[in-house]
Image (cartoon, grey):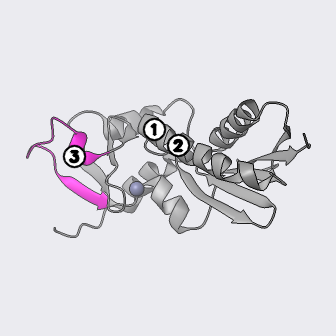
Amino acid sequence: MVQYFPFRKELNQARGYLKTRGPKSKKNEQEYGPGKTDILVCEQCRAFYWHKSWHRNLEDYPALNQEKGLKFTTCPACQMIKDKRYEGQVLVQNAPVEMKAGIKKLAETYGQRATENDAMDRVISIEETGPIIEIKTTENQMAKRLAKKISEVYRGKFELSISNSKGEDTARARLTFKGK
Ligand SMILES: [Zn+2]
């Protein structure tokens, strides 16, 4: 494949996707309007930027043809993972040994479904360190939803608290095991 070096402006706009969840600006629409630009493809995960958002697999794109050029880049989610950043964190504390596998499986399945719905929504990592299971996500609402889901599945077993860090877009959800 031909190596392509995208314009800085273009890349910054594409990468800015996670930061601009709100209404897209007029400018953005013009820049990415139909026929005006090539398709950006993530080298890591094959997500592609088209029609103002990132889609999951370039291979799934039915109308892909020679009319549009491909520009290779790194999508915002892969860039975040590469930079070891995250926007959502779930901390499960003191879960009994027999629940740990189930919680991790739940997080994994949740991540897969989330990514199917939105290519930029990822469960970045699921790590167990002593009594703590730490789950990191690319998006803050994901962490909140996952924590609520765990809390529902293990009804009454965990105390849930959610906090947003000030000045940042990062959310932390803490699930603390209460006992029987
Ligand atoms: Zn990617």
Residue stretch in magenta: 57-72
2 and 1 marks in contact (CB < 8 Å) = no
Cα–Cα gap, marks 2 and 1: 14 Å
Q: Position of residue 154 (x, y in %)?
A: 76, 35
Q: Amino acid at mark 2?
A: Thr
Residue highlighted by disc 2: 109
Give the number of the disc on residue 100: none
82 left or right of 84 in image: left
Q: Amino acid at mark 3?
A: Glu
Q: Secondary structure at mark 1?
A: loop
Q: Position of residue 7 (x, y in %)?
A: 34, 61
Q: Secondary structure at mark 3?
A: helix
- Quadrant of the frame with the N terminus: bottom left
Q: Amino acid at mark 1?
A: Asp
What is the quadrant of residue 132 in the picture?
A: bottom right
Q: Position of residue 129 (x, y in %)?
A: 74, 67
Residue 17 lies within the magenta run: no
